[in-house]
Image (cartoon, rainbow, N blue to C red):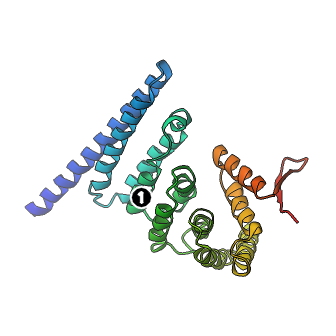
Amino acid sequence: MLSLKNQKITNYFSLFIFAGLCLTSIINLQKARWQAETSSLSQAEYFKQEQAQKAALNIQKKLPSFGFSNLIADWTYLQFLQYFGDGEVREKIGYSLSPDYFEAVVDRDPRFVRAYFLMSPATSIFAGEAQKGVNLIDKGLQSISPDIHPQAYYLWVYKGIDEMLFLGDTKAAQQSYEMAAQWAEQNEDPASQRSAANVRQTAQFLSEDPDSTIARIGAWTMVLSSTSDEKTQQRAIEQIQSLGGQIVISPEGGLSVRVPG
C-alpha cells in the first residue's frame, strides 16, 4: 500500500516538473517574442536561442509520460507551431529543429495523424531532411490504420512525395502511392475517392516512366492542395512551373494545374 502511495507521489511530482517546464517554456517564448519586438537580434543570438530550444526539447523527450503521452505530444506540437510560424527568425536561421519536433511527437503519439500534415513537409521541404521524415512516417504507420482518421492515407502520399521528389526512389514512391490509394478507397466520401484515383494514376505513371514529368507535377500539385502554409504553396507553384505546368485560376478563385503536352 505504501509502495502504491509512493508511486502516486512520484507520478504527481513528475507531472509537476513537466508543468513547470511547460510554464517556463511559455515564459521564455513570450520573452523571446518581446525581445524580437523591441530589438533586432543578431543571427548568432538567434542561433543561441535555438540551441536552448533544442536542449529543452531533448529534456522533454526524456521525461516519463506516466500515461500522459498524448498530452505531451499535443504540447510539443503547439511548441512546433510557434517555432514554425516565427517567420522572421526562420528566414534568418532556417528550420533545423523541425525534424526534432517531428520525432518528439511521433515518439509520444504516433497516431496523431493531423500533426504529420505540417511536420512532414516542414522536415523534408524546409529542413531538407526528407530521409528522416520518411523514417518517422514509417515509424508512425506501424501504429496507424485507415480507420483511425479519414485522411490517414495522406501519410502514404507524403511519404511517396518525399521518396520521389527528394530521395529519387521512384520504386518506393510507387508502392507508397498504391498504399495511399488502397487506404483512400476505404472511405466513401467523394474527396477520398478522387484522391484514390489520382494517386493510383500517379503510381501507374511511375510504373511506366520512373522519371515522369507528369507524376512530378502531380506530386507538387498534391503538396499545393494539401497545405495551408503560404511558403510551401509558393514552393510548390514554382516547382510546377519549372516542370512546364501552368497554374490556372478560375473567376471564382479556384486553382487548377494544367500539365504540358
Horizontal side of residue 90 vs 164, given as left or right: left
Residue 100, given in percent of the width and then of the height, sits at 41, 53
Q: For residue 230, what is the image quadrant?
A: top right
Residue at 37% x, 32% y is 28
Q: For residue 257, what is the image quadrant?
A: bottom right
Give the SS element for disc 1. helix
- Figure quadrant of the C terminus: bottom right
User: Which one is in front, 64 or 257?
Assistant: 257
Residue 71, given in percent of the width and then of the height, sits at 39, 54
Q: Residue furthest top?
A: 38
Give the residue type that dot 1 points to.
Answer: Glu
Q: Residue furthest left?
A: 2
Position of 124 relative to 195 (above/below): above
Horizontal side of residue 241 vs 16, given as left or right: right
Residue 90, given in percent of the width and then of the height, sits at 52, 38
Residue that badge 1 annotates = 103
| Total tally of numbered discs in the picture | 1
